Image: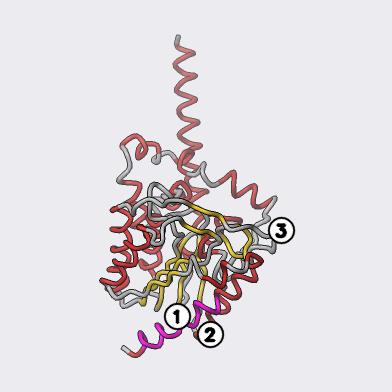
């Protein structure tokens, strides 16, 4: 019995020491190194992006807007901070992290047509666990509001960092991501072009998602940041003439005098499937054209804002 107790105590001590050392090493690595692969743009957004214009959203903006074209048009530095698969709640958290250390002159928030409805695009917050308790208030607030069991698990470094290390090691060996230095990730031209996709119905906007948009608007207004919202082109046709969740966002933008560029059904793009990679994403040729379209709109906003 005594040997069993000693064995159990030894295991507990080994786990405790391993957990502690894991935390020390992981914290040092994250603070002093740029993370690779699909973590790269998120890591850069949180820790160092200081451009005058920041593009925020999911793949809707990641693959649609080339920051270099924005820079050439507006003579302002720009970074594409689109993160694949993320929703508006995640975007707000990342915006908070940026505003904690840097105030850009302009933020462009990109949305997908159906994003504000149902449970679409809620965000994958696990990728933010390594940044918990590292000084980012919005990340800490999010995880502190989770259930008691989840908060308890986060106290373990082995559990907290297990969302990152396997991926980091894989990216070090096999990093096939195509992010450019400015965050942009253009889609290749496919071997065959997609056909237009018909969608019968889109859900109504969920109130907490609209509240999230409203908080972002207010934060930008407080810091005198010119905020714009855009819906990049898609190759989709919706059964309803007006999409309820887009109307709700547009109405909110109108009430705060925020520009909202609704281009998801842009007639030029819908007539040219060769500009798309798939139904939801333009390819690099489409991105080149749309970047020029949106840059002309942003230039007007920038000129008006800078005169204030």
Real-space CA distance between mark 2 and mark 3, rounded to the nearest whole angstrom:
32 Å
- Left or right: 20 in relation to 258: right
Residue drawn at (57%, 79%) of the image: 69
Q: Is residue 43 in sight in this rendering?
A: no
Classify the position of the N terminus by image quarter: top left
Q: Which residues are magenta?
A: 291-306
Mark pair 2, 1: CA separation? 9 Å
Circle nearer the N terminus (2, 1): 2
In the rendered view, does 149 fall on the left or right side of 273? left
Q: In the rendering, at what x and y percent does residue 154 appear?
A: 40, 41
Check if residue 295 falls in the magenta segment: yes
Closer mark to the observer between disc 1 and disc 3: 3
Q: Residue at x 52, y 66 (%)?
A: 233
The residue labelled by disc 2 is 73
Q: Position of residue 29 (x, y in %)?
A: 53, 54
Taking the view exactly as shown, the residue that stands out farthest to the right is: 191
The residue singled out by tag 3 in the image is 192
């Amino acid at each position: 019995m005594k040997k069993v107790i000693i064995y159990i105590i030894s295991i507990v001590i080994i786990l405790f020491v391993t957990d502690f050392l894991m935390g020390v090493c992981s914290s040092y690595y994250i603070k002093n190194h740029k993370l690779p692969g699909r973590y790269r743009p998120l890591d850069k957004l949180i820790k160092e992006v200081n451009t005058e214009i920041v593009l925020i959203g999911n793949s809707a903006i990641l693959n649609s807007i080339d920051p270099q074209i924005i820079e050439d048009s507006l003579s302002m530095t720009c970074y594409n901070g689109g993160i694949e698969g993320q929703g508006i709640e995640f975007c707000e958290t990342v915006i908070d992290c940026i505003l904690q250390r840097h105030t850009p002159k302009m933020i462009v928030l990109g949305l997908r047509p159906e994003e504000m409805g149902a449970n679409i695009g809620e965000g994958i917050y696990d990728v933010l666990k390594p940044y918990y308790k590292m000084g980012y208030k919005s990340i800490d607030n999010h995880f502190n509001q989770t259930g008691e069991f989840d908060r308890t698990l986060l106290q373990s470094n082995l559990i907290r960092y297990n969302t990152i290390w396997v991926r980091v090691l894989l990216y070090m060996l096999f990093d096939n991501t195509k992010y450019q230095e400015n965050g942009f990730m253009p889609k290749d031209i496919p071997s065959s072009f997609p056909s237009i996709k018909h969608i019968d119905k889109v859900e109504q906007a969920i109130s907490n998602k609209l509240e999230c948009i409203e908080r972002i608007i207010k934060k930008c207004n407080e810091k005198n940041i010119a905020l714009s919202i855009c819906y990049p082109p898609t190759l989709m046709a919706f059964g309803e003439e007006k999409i309820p969740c887009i109307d709700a966002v547009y109405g909110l933008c109108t009430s705060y005098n925020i520009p909202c560029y609704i281009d998801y059904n842009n007639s030029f793009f819908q007539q040219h499937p060769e500009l798309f990679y798939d139904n939801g994403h333009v390819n690099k040729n489409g991105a080149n054209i749309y970047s020029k379209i949106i840059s002309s709109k942003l230039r007007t906003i920038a000129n008006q804002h800078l005169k204030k």
